[in-house]
Image (cartoon, rainbow, N blue to C red):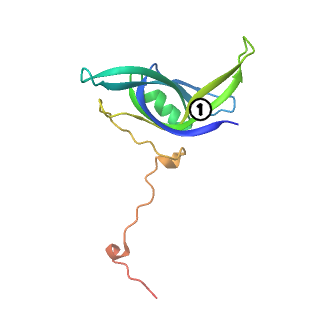
Amino acid sequence: MTTKIPVTIEGNLTGDPEHGAGESGNEYARFTVAVNDRRLNETTNRWEDAGTVFHRVVVFNQQSRHVANSLRKGASVIVAGDLRFGTYTDKETGQARETRDIIADNVGASLKFASVAVDRVPKATSPAADASGPVTVPVSHTGAGVAR
């Protein structure tokens, strides 16, 4: 059983996202986010780096394609999801190891130091997603009467 803890992080990608598909066909994107901790040095009254924590992130399905197509190494991102802890057996040593990954529900470019252009993608994946659909006009504008 894994433990899930909701988290939101802000940091920079350490490399381009890796995009692929699992054995079941589900798409994923994996990437690492470096979160820098900064603290005010009360002696010098200046901000200083106090360490970096690296978080592995996995995102699935359509969002994985968007992440792979949109984000590159160094991009500032905000990630919201669940922090999950797990265990596995190292194939080389046979020892039990622990993992800590963020399974992302939402990944976005941070606008703190950059600007982006957003291209909306339809939610549906069928040809109907691009169809304009029927156009409706209120009866009051058509001149048609209502018969009872």
Residue 142 image offset from top left, x and y in percent: 34, 73
Residue furthest left as drawn:
45
Other-residue count near label 1 (Cα within 10 Å), few / some / many at <14 / 14–19 / ≥20: some
Q: Which residue is mark 1?
A: 27
- Asked if residue 147 is positioned above or below residue 72 in the image, the reply reads below
**Local secondary structure at mark 1:** strand
Residue furthest front as drawn:
43
Nearest the viewer among 141 and 33 is 33
Does any portion of residue 105 appear in the rendered image?
no
Nearest the viewer among 129 and 76 is 76
Q: What amino acid does circle 1 point to?
A: Glu
Q: Work out which quarter of the rendered image holds the N terminus and state it.
A: top right
Q: Is residue 35 left or right of residue 43?
A: right
Does any portion of residue 50 appear in the rendered image?
yes
- Asked if residue 110 is positioned above or below residue 142 in the image, the reply reads above
Dividing the picture into quadrants, the one containing residue 40 is: top left
Residue 93 image offset from top left, x and y in percent: 73, 11
Residue 34 image offset from top left, x and y in percent: 44, 23
Please name the residue shown 73% across and 15% down the image. 91
Residue 81 image offset from top left, x and y in percent: 52, 38
Please name the residue shown 43% across and 21% down the image. 52
